[in-house]
Amino acid sequence: MIGIDLVEVERFELDDNFMSRIAYEEEIAYIKKSKSVELQRQRLASLWAVKEAVMKALGLGEKSGVSFKDIKLCHEESGKPYVELFGIAKQEFNISHYDKRVEISLSHTKNYATAIAVIK
């Protein structure tokens, strides 16, 4: 299964209320770690894109009850991104893909952020 998402960075504002609804404290800290507001917005857009891509790879739509906090973006010490699943996302993964793993890749520029999730 593959999921992909592409978003325009300009759609995202660094609003604490918005971020707290879709992101864990660690994800918000990672976004705010950059001193550049432009890079912070790119990271927020990438966070949105990766969560959307994972939902698509899992085949979960808005009617499934999945939430953005069912997917957590993490980073290895090397900087390589990976996701941890919770709630409905984890349940669906365990039912349909229990013997696999989710691989992700994300990228961003001044104008766009994209993410791909592959379950293999």
Image (tube, rainbow, N blue to C red):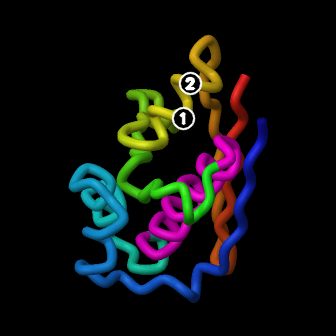
10 Å crowding of disc 2: few (<14), some (14-19), many (20+): few
- Seen in the picture, residue 7 relative to 13 is either above or below; the reply is above
Question: Which element is circle 2 on?
Answer: helix
Look at the numbered discs 1 and 2 and tell me whether their residues touch, using CB distance below 8 Å: yes
- Chief SS of the magenta region: helix
The residue nearer to you, when weighing 110 against 22, is 22
What residue appears at the point 33 percent right and 60 percent down from the top-left corner? Answer: 23
Asked whether 16 or 34 is in front, the reply is 16
As drawn, the residue found furthest toward the top would be 99
106 relative to 34 in the view: left or right: right
Per the image, the residue denoted by label 2 is 95
User: Could you say where residue 42 lies in the image, as x and y percent from the top left?
Assistant: 53, 70
Is 58 included in the stretch rendered in magenta? yes
Whether 111 is among the magenta residues is no
Which amino acid does the dot numbered 1 rest on?
A: Glu
Q: Secondary structure at mark 1?
A: helix
Highlighted magenta segment, given as a residue range: 40-59
Q: Quadrant of residue 8?
A: bottom right
Vertical placement of residue 81 versus 26, above or below: above
> Can you say which quadrant of the picture contains the N terminus?
top right
The percent position of residue 38, horizontal first and vertical second, equals: 48, 79
* Among the 4 quarters of the image, the one containing residue 108: bottom right
Q: Residue at x 68, y 47 (%)?
A: 59
Identified at 51% across, 38% down, the residue is 81
Q: Which residue is mark 1?
A: 92
Indicate the position of residue 89 as horizontal and vertical percent values: 48, 41
Q: Position of residue 100 (x, y in %)?
A: 64, 17
Q: Nearer the viewer, residue 54 or 97?
A: 97
